[in-house]
Amino acid sequence: MRDCGVLQVEPTDFCNLTCPMCHPQQGFRTTLHGGLRKGFMDVGLFRRIVDGIARSDVRFDHLIFQWLGDPSLHPGLEEMLAYAIDRAADRFGYFRIDTNAVILTPGRVDRIVEAYARRPGTPVLLVFSIDAASPETYVRVKGKDAFHAVLDHVRYFLERRGRLDLPHVSLNCEFQFVLQEGNHHEARRFVEFWDETCARGRNGIGWNEVMIKRLSVGTGGPAQDAADRLYEETVRRLDLRPYDKPHVHVKLWEQSFWRKDAGDAAGGRAS
């Protein structure tokens, strides 16, 4: 069986936020991929892709549902996840969904949990792109007043996952904080909040990760150098360090792969 790295599927290139750090989504542009207008992947097409993989001799490290848009905007996301798990779980090490969770309502969380529970031996990872520890900062770095809705949805996910009656749970999550000019002062507060949240009750089952991530600037050059300096200065100033607890794992993305000296940087798992 051939190992083929990561398979990236984009359910939609629409997004409901205009984060300043995300240049493709500025101004709610109508096109992102050349001359193709934004749209939604046909679920039938996705099924044919999965069926072809199931019949093949390939294996991927994981399948990620995301690229330039937010996959939760696709009304068939949960159906797509369930189909991939049912038909091709043995072709992927795990399944991953990256989302801002703005519209990941309890009903949709229920369907994701139910899809995972079909074959609980296959890990599913939800990456929650949050980037703030207060409503004011959320508006600044995400462009929308949705902080409390996001917290409600993520907390419901933790509570719903906690009700799974399984000897081992590999329905995992990552709380992501892309450090930038508008939020760097909240990095420690972000870590402490999710550490405390995951310590409550069964919120800590599965693998829970807090990722303090570098900002990748598409234009590179001086702007990327400034983002890297801000990251490194903030890590030192706030004394941010990776650590592991039974209920949570804190990671720093210390490598900057776009720099010539990236090979000399301290190792941190990029997500």
Image: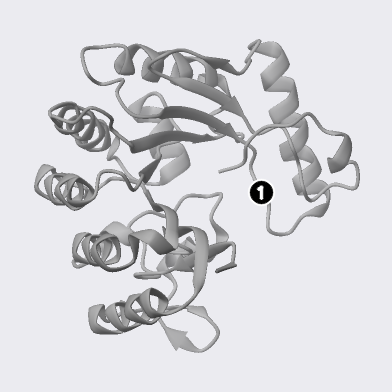
Q: Is residue 85 left or right of residue 253?
A: left
Residue 48: quadrant of the picture: bottom left
The quadrant of the picture occupied by the N terminus is bottom right
Q: Nearer the viewer, residue 131 or 58?
A: 58
> Taking 226 as reference, is 185 above or below it?
above
Q: Is residue 211 left or right of residue 267?
A: left
Q: In x, y percent, where is residue 235? A: 68, 19
Q: In x, y percent, where is residue 13? A: 40, 70
Q: In x, y percent, where is residue 66? A: 43, 61
Q: Residue at x 28, y 30 (%)?
A: 168
- The residue indicated by pointer 1 is 216
Q: Residue at x 17, y 27 (%)?
A: 159
Query: Which residue is outermost to the bottom?
Result: 35
Q: Amino acid at mark 1?
A: Ser
The quadrant of the picture occupied by the C terminus is top right
Residue 236: quadrant of the picture: top right
Q: Nearer the viewer, residue 228 or 18?
A: 228
Q: Residue at x 14, y 48 (%)?
A: 114
Query: Which residue is outermost to the front?
Result: 1
Q: Is residue 27 left or right of residue 226?
A: left
Q: How many marks?
A: 1
Colour style of the rendered protein structure? one colour
Q: Residue at x 24, y 78 (%)?
A: 43
Residue 79: quadrant of the picture: bottom left
Q: In x, y percent, where is residue 108? A: 15, 51
Q: Nearer the viewer, residue 108 or 89?
A: 89
The answer to whether residue 179 shows anywhere in this view is no
The answer to whether residue 119 shows anywhere in this view is yes
Disc 1 element: loop
Graded by Cα atoms within 10 Å as few (under 14), some (14 to 19) or many (20 or more), the crowding at tag 1 reads many
